Amino acid sequence: MPARQAVQMARNLLLQWRATRKQPQITEQQRNDQLYVQWQPPTEGYVKCNIDAALFGDQQCFGIGMCIRNTQGRFVKALTKWFECYPSPLEVISWLGELGLSMVQIELDCKLVVEGIMDKSNNQSDFGNILSSCRSLLQQFPNFKISFIWRQANFVTHTFSRESRLYASHHVFYLIPSCISSIMLNERI
């Protein structure tokens, strides 16, 4: 692993550790509430894009999965992609913009990224620069809303991101992929 990549990985782990330490302790009731979290459709007029990333240590690469659904919870489109370096949230925003979507609720289960994008402070790290670029790009799409979601409610893309390395580097799905069809069906029941 190149030194620059190792330093960046160590920095990201430190940021995640610090963010975790800052989080207040959750009560038993809150923990039980998290067990029953499930995916919710977007607000009327919006589509929802759920995102997740996976690290494949054995192959030294990352994969992402993105799934867009409408207000009825129906599949619209999905994308998988894998990278030999860190995936950037810019990939997601750019793809949604290229699709011509104007009203999108973006959900991901990485609280560090969501809080970093929402935070207006000037973080000079590589990670901070990526988040700053995301904020700038999001200004071009005023109706893109980004928020945190618990992994239990993001299970479609959690599963999908792990499947990303089975496809070509960049793969767009126009029909529901078999690896997530049963999960999506169960979420609609």
Image: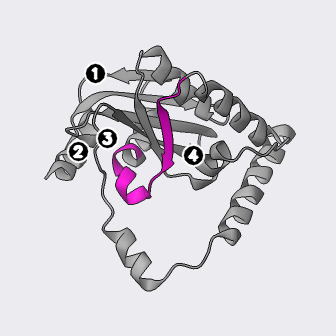
Q: Nearer the viewer, mark 4 or mark 2?
A: 2
Mark sitting earlier along the chain (2/3): 3
Identify the residue at the far bottom of this view. 28
Give the mark, 2 or 1, whose residue is nearer the N terminus. 1
Tell me which amino acid carries mark 4. Leu
- Disc 4 to disc 2, C-alpha distance: 23 Å
**In this rendering, position of residue 152 left or right of residue 116:** left
Distance from the alpha carbon under mark 4 to that under mark 3: 31 Å
Residue 124 x/y as whole percent: 85, 41
The answer to whether the residues at label 2 and label 3 have Cβ atoms under 8 Å apart is no
User: Residue 153 magenta-drawn?
Assistant: yes
Number of disc labels: 4
Magenta region: which residues?
Answer: 141-157
Which residue is labeled 1 in the image?
174
Foreground disc of the pair 4, 1: 1
Left or right? Give the position of 102 relative to 182: right
For the residues bearing labels 4 and 1, Cβ distance under 8 angstroms: no
Q: Nearer the viewer, residue 145 or 185?
A: 145
Would you name the residue on which mark 4 appears? 55
